[in-house]
Amino acid sequence: MLPQPTDAAVPASKPTQGRFSAWVEVLRTTNPPKGRPLDPVSRWLVLTRAAVLPMTLVAGAVATLLAVRRPGFNTGLLLLAFAGLLLAHCANNLMNDLFDAEVGADTASYPRALYAPHPVLSGMVSRGRLARAALLVNLLDLAILVVLAVYRGWPVVGFALGGFLLSVAYTAPPLRLKKRGLGEPDVFVVWGPLMVGGTYYAALGHLPWEIIVASVPYGLLCTAVLMGKHIDKAPFDEPLGIRTLPVVLGERRARAATVGMMVAFYVTVAVCVAVRALPWPALVSLGAIPKLVQAWKYFGQPKPDEPPEGFPVWPLWFAAIAFVHTRRAGSLLVLGLIIAAVANIR
């Protein structure tokens, strides 16, 4: 089932409940609640596109659950690394909107401003305030990095710096990796080896090869979401000379490649279990195959001309489908790893 907006009325006599329901709606749909003024938390959730932060939460959870039973596990450093991941993702979203607005890629008629309010184009904040917000979040992340570096040394700096540089290079001149068909590999590296490997290293101070291998399945899921988003945006990107991978491949082959990535998640989970990079309860993630079948059906045909009633993120379509699949598969992978951690299964 695709994500739907929350339209339930909230009694005026319960302002706390009203704020909470607004936060839930933003997290479900990436959009502010209709007919209500934005409170500070809702505004921040919209600005940072917090609805997609669960992808980062799952990456951190995978690393945590693989590390938690290992000798030398440091809970404090793990929590710092986890906070650093979330801040880095928020900073990445803020910087993407800032740089895309600066170079003219984001306009009022571009999908980014249609499926949710663009921070600058919607008038929510000025460019200057958006830049200051991105700077503040990056400075907080830097403070966390300093602490982690004191305890874990320079390798953790390498992970953080690699993630930061790839995040900036995704949209910022002169590289603009998204424009050159390299945005998708960028996301695979960041949400796979860098996030999972870096968090594991922060918690334990070493990184066996199995963890890098174990990061591959979830990296594929996150890349599939971006592929879906870029398929949706291809008709807008191609005239602007933005050659994302779906623009290079063409829509039909891009849809097939995205399904291939989703299928590859299950294959690589099985391979990881076979080489003991993941514990066997990770096979619980195979329970998401019905969602794969559903997603495959949608990806097997072109995008509809009109959105279903109540569909919250139009003109995105394939991105939402891939996200729903990723949410289910990622959640079941985490469940399997929780089972393994509790039972001490390696």
Image (cartoon, rainbow, N blue to C red):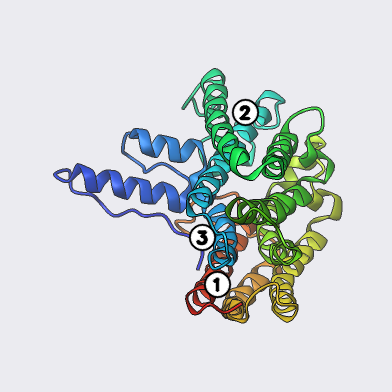
Which residue carries the number 2 mark?
A: 98
Three-letter amino acid code at disc 2?
Leu
Graded by Cα atoms within 10 Å as few (under 14), some (14 to 19) or many (20 or more), the crowding at tag 2 reads: many
Query: Nearer the viewer's eye, disc 3 or disc 1?
Result: 1
Which residue shows up at 37% across the image and 43% down it? 33
Place of residue 290 in the rendered image (x, y in percent of width and height, measured from the top left): 58, 79
Which residue carries the number 3 mark?
A: 308
Three-letter amino acid code at disc 3?
Pro
Give yes or no for contact between labels 1 and 2 (Cβ–Cβ under 8 Å).
no
Local secondary structure at mark 2: helix
* Residue 129 appears anywhere in the view: yes
Q: Nearer the viewer, residue 22 or 305?
A: 22
Q: Which mark is residue 337?
A: 1
Which residue shows up at 69% across the image and 62% down it? 215
* Above or below: residue 207 compared with residue 137: below
Q: Nearer the viewer, residue 266 or 205?
A: 205
Query: Nearer the viewer's eye, disc 1 or disc 2?
Result: 1
Side of 39 where 109 appears, left or right: right
Local secondary structure at mark 1: helix
Place of residue 212 in the rendered image (x, y in percent of width and height, measured from the top left): 73, 61
Q: Nearer the viewer, residue 151 or 346?
A: 151
Side of 104 where 42 appears, left or right: left
Which residue shows up at 57% across the image and 71% down it? 333
Quarter of the image for residue 228 reads: bottom right
